Image: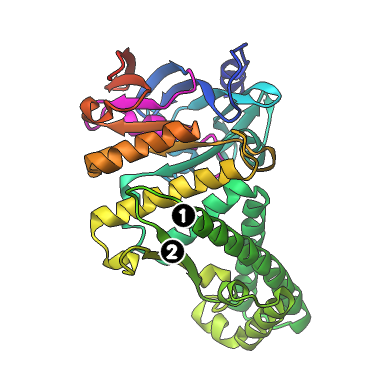
């Protein structure tokens, strides 16, 4: 596996382009793609073809070039074309320092499948991927984001926050690990106060840091959407629950940490019996309201919910650009690459044109899929036809 990734991420000279864009993408033994090579010029990319052709598989492959388990939340071995062999995804990415070759895939040792990362041919980390690529996505499965469980909404928000603040992923991971450790201690019936005090201090410290980052992310998104114009509705976002609610109202972070610590200590017996942790930011929820009608997102039509999601994704991209006024986004962070799976089919012509105009105005590289190539006629993009895991260049539609 290492040799596959090293070969695919050797890096090649490419023309200058704004940071954060893919200039070459290679899939090997990934899903139904035996080998797919795409040479990209930085414009949006349109992938069309029948259902099951492998369009979404390309988007999923790109999503795995960011920390985490990608847009399908897979385990390491689940994307292999033959159901068990090694797969690899590699790309050449424009950065401010020049082209960088990145890649990921699986290898196998005595413990089973293991996810690998390569940066310019050398072993890398998930976090290192985020230094070069910033990826956000919308998929049909996310159409129910506002009506399904709160955990999906928290993950959605955390990915947007992470795009601006890579340390947020580490905070969330440390918080969740501490919560699991406390649950294990309580489940085993151990009640050593000193031990629990130490774990709960970690939970409170990491938890308030997570909450502060979320509150800042919500404020950034709300501010950007309030200033936006066009046919996409404004989503007014907030966080329900503690400690985010207290912090969003201007509460003191130290007081919020003290309150969380007190709640954890008071709930030890109950949490031990229920097997849950009843206080903390893992119980908070992202709330969205349609700014034009005042209706809560779950009460909006399916089309309006989709429009609200697109508005949030575009606001996040605008915030990245506005932070420094450069393509590289805030503080040297790369511009986001957007993965938009089957999005335009659910938009009327006005909103479809508005989406294309926004992508062009922001200078974003977006990968869009659909079954009807004619729907993308108004977008200056590279067009590819996908059929049975094979991808071929198609003449631009315009």
Near-viewer residue (13 or 192): 13
Q: Mark 2 points at which residue?
A: 236
Which image quarter is the N terminus in?
top right
Q: In which quarter of the image is residue 126?
A: top right
- Which residue appears farthest toward the top when viewing the image? 13
Q: Which residue is drawn at 32% across and 32% down?
A: 369
Q: Distance between the residues labelled 2 and 1?
A: 8 Å
Which image quarter is the C terminus in?
top left
Point out residue 346 in the picture as x, y percentages from the top left corner.
24, 44
Point out residue 71 in the picture as x, y percentages from the top left corner.
43, 43
For residue 356, say whether it is visible: yes
Element at label 1: helix
Q: Is residue 174 above or below residue 83?
A: below
Marks 2 and 1, the one that precedes in the sequence = 1
Residue 225's label in the rendered image is: 1
Q: In this view, does 327 lie above or below 189?
A: above
Q: Give the range drawn in magenta.
A: 41-68
Name the side, left or right, on which 238 lies relative to 174. Answer: left
Point out residue 116 in the picture as x, y percentages from the top left corner.
60, 33
């Amino acid at each position: 596996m290492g040799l596959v990734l090293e070969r695919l991420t050797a890096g090649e000279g490419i023309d200058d382009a704004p940071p954060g864009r893919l200039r070459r993408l290679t899939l090997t033994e990934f899903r139904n793609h035996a080998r797919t090579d795409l040479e990209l010029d930085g414009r949006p990319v349109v992938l069309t073809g029948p259902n099951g052709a492998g369009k979404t598989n390309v988007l999923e492959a790109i999503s795995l070039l960011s920390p985490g388990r990608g847009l399908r939340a897979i385990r390491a071995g689940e994307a292999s074309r033959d159901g068990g062999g090694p797969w690899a995804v590699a790309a050449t990415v424009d950065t401010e320092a020049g082209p960088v070759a990145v890649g990921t895939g699986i290898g196998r040792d005595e413990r089973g499948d293991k996810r690998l990362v390569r940066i310019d041919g050398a072993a890398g980390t998930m976090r290192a991927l985020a230094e070069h690529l910033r990826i956000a996505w919308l998929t049909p499965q996310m159409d129910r984001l506002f009506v399904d469980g709160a955990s999906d909404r928290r993950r959605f928000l955390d990915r947007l926050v992470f795009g601006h603040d890579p340390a947020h992923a580490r905070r969330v991971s440390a918080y969740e690990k501490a919560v699991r450790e406390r649950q294990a201690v309580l489940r085993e019936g151990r009640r050593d106060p000193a031990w629990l005090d130490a774990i709960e201090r970690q939970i409170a410290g990491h938890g308030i840091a997570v909450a502060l980052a979320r509150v800042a992310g919500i404020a950034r998104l709300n501010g950007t959407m309030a200033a936006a114009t066009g046919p996409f509705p404004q989503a007014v976002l907030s966080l329900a629950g503690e400690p985010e609610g207290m912090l969003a109202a201007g509460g003191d972070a130290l007081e919020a940490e003290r309150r969380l610590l007190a709640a954890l200590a008071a709930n030890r017996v109950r949490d031990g019996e229920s097997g849950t942790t009843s206080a903390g930011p893992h119980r908070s929820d992202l709330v969205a309201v349609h700014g034009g009608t005042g209706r809560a997102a779950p009460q909006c039509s399916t089309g309006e919910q989709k429009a609200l999601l697109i508005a949030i994704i575009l606001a996040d991209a605008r915030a990245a650009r506005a932070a420094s006024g450069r393509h590289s986004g805030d503080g040297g962070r790369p511009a986001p690459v957007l993965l938009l799976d089957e999005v335009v089919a659910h938009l009327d012509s006005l909103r479809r044109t508005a989406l294309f105009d926004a992508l062009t105005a922001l200078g974003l590289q977006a990968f869009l899929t659909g079954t009807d190539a004619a729907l993308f006629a108004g977008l200056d993009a590279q067009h590819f036809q996908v059929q049975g895991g094979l991808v071929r260049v198609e003449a631009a539609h315009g």
